[in-house]
Amino acid sequence: GYDEHSTIPAYAEPLLVFSAPFQAGATAYRLSWGDGTAATDAGPSDTAADTTNAVSDRLAVEFAWSQPKFSNDVTTCVVTDDLLFGFDLRDPQSKAHRPSRGEFRCLDMQTGEILWSEPDFGQSSMIASGNRLLLFSDAGTVRRIEVSRDGAKEQAVAEVFPDHVCWTRPTFADGLLYLRGGEQFVCLDLSITTESGAQQSDAAPTLHLSDLPRHDIRSPFWLLNGEREHPFMPPEADELLRWYLTGLACVLLPGLLIPVVDRGWKSQSPDRQLTLLCGGVVPLALIATPLLNRWGTSMPGIHGAFVFTWPAGLFALLQVAVLASQRVTRHPGHRHHYWAARLWGGLFIAASLGYYLCLKHNGLPLEWVFLVGYVSALPVALWTARVALGT
């Protein structure tokens, strides 16, 4: 299921702003007591509210404005000098394997009007102090910026956790900024640096950011070259049909090309033909996914869509592994068949494990369901193997 992605509402008398994930935008409500004065304290626990106007014996809630291009996910917006700062998430939700796409925005708190946007700051947790903001982006970068209604001026920037996606909120106290990444906790002393950037001579020895241990993390995203827009929602019927048709193409193409390339195809036994066919399906299904996701977007039915052909390769490997095991059953004393069965079985297990880990890292957990498909595919694979072996 889902983890909770709700952000903390932002309040600046008399407006309360809710900014939601999943591209739902932001909505502001004007709060006042029954006598018309602004709600300046917590008020009674017995209150009422709706999206238009609601009055209890103490509290009134009235719709103020909405802004569809201000969707915060994971991080919470802040208010300073009647300006609302936050992130407009273009993704349906934040991704655990890469920084989020979207724009950092400044809104007029009273009207919800977008005053300016900055595409380079990224989705950030924020700490406000007057007209200055400390930003800690999900790319692990810290920025200090000076803001106004006219724009933002970057004063300092540092890459603290470039190897991790960071959704944690920073803490600032006594000139110290506390940051937590996926594997490290860092304290930055913002008070020991002169205007020229040199460390003060009477300060205690400290680590520099360059002294922090780094991890050379290589993402397997290139193996897919794409991702589903809603990775945690079950695939729609058109998605499943697209995957089925592209996977079917990965099966049919080797069946058409191998007999043309291999002149001895017709003289091969059925079980050898089946092995060659599945052996051609596996690499084609593996490379078709990244190729189609990168260069096939102009093809009819694929434009802008995620293509996924890997299951065809997995089930082809399952068929070869079952066929190899059936050869051992038919020829129990043949060591060549024995070791071939072990080899194909090992490749099948390794491919399934690699499939699981790659999808986990790329945030596609629902595609793990194809691994469960082995249960229903196994009887068909056994029947096909026995027919090919003539048993």
Image: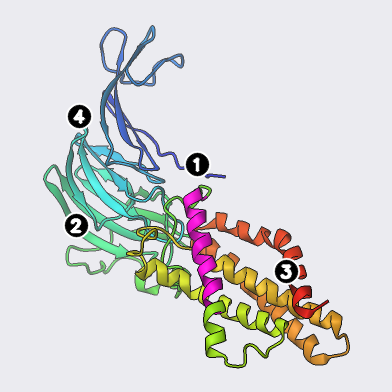
Counting from the top left corner in percent of width and height, residue 173 is at 36, 48
Looking at marks 4 and 1 on the same chain, the residue that comes earlier in the sequence is marked by: 1
- Disc 1 marks a residue whose amino acid type is Glu
Task: Assess disc 3: are there few (<14), some (14-19) or many (≥20) residues with their C-alpha within 10 Å of its C-alpha.
Answer: many
Of the image marks 1 and 2, the number of the one nearer the N terminus: 1
Residue 369 x %, y %:
62, 56
Asked whether the residues under the numbered discs 4 and 2 touch, taking CB atoms below 8 Å apart as contact, a structural biologist would say no
In the picture, residue 106 is in which quadrant?
top left
Whole-angstrom CA distance, mark 3 to mark 2, is: 61 Å
Look at mark 4 in the image and give the residue it sits on.
110
* Residue tagged 3: 381
Horizontal and vertical percent position of residue 192: 28, 61
Residue 28: quadrant of the picture: top left
Question: Whole-Å distance between the Cαs marked 4 and 2?
Answer: 25 Å
Looking at marks 1 and 3 on the same chain, the residue that comes earlier in the sequence is marked by 1
Question: The N terminus appears in which quarter of the rendering?
Answer: top right
Label 4 to label 1: alpha-carbon separation: 28 Å
What label sits on residue 154 in the rendered view?
Answer: 2
Is tag 3's residue or tag 2's residue first in the polypeptide sequence?
2
Mark-to-mark CA distance, 1 and 3? 42 Å
Q: Count the marks.
A: 4
Name which residue lies at 19% across and 44% down: 131
SS label for mark 1:
loop
Q: Element type at marker 2?
A: strand
Q: Nearer the viewer, mark 4 or mark 2?
A: 4
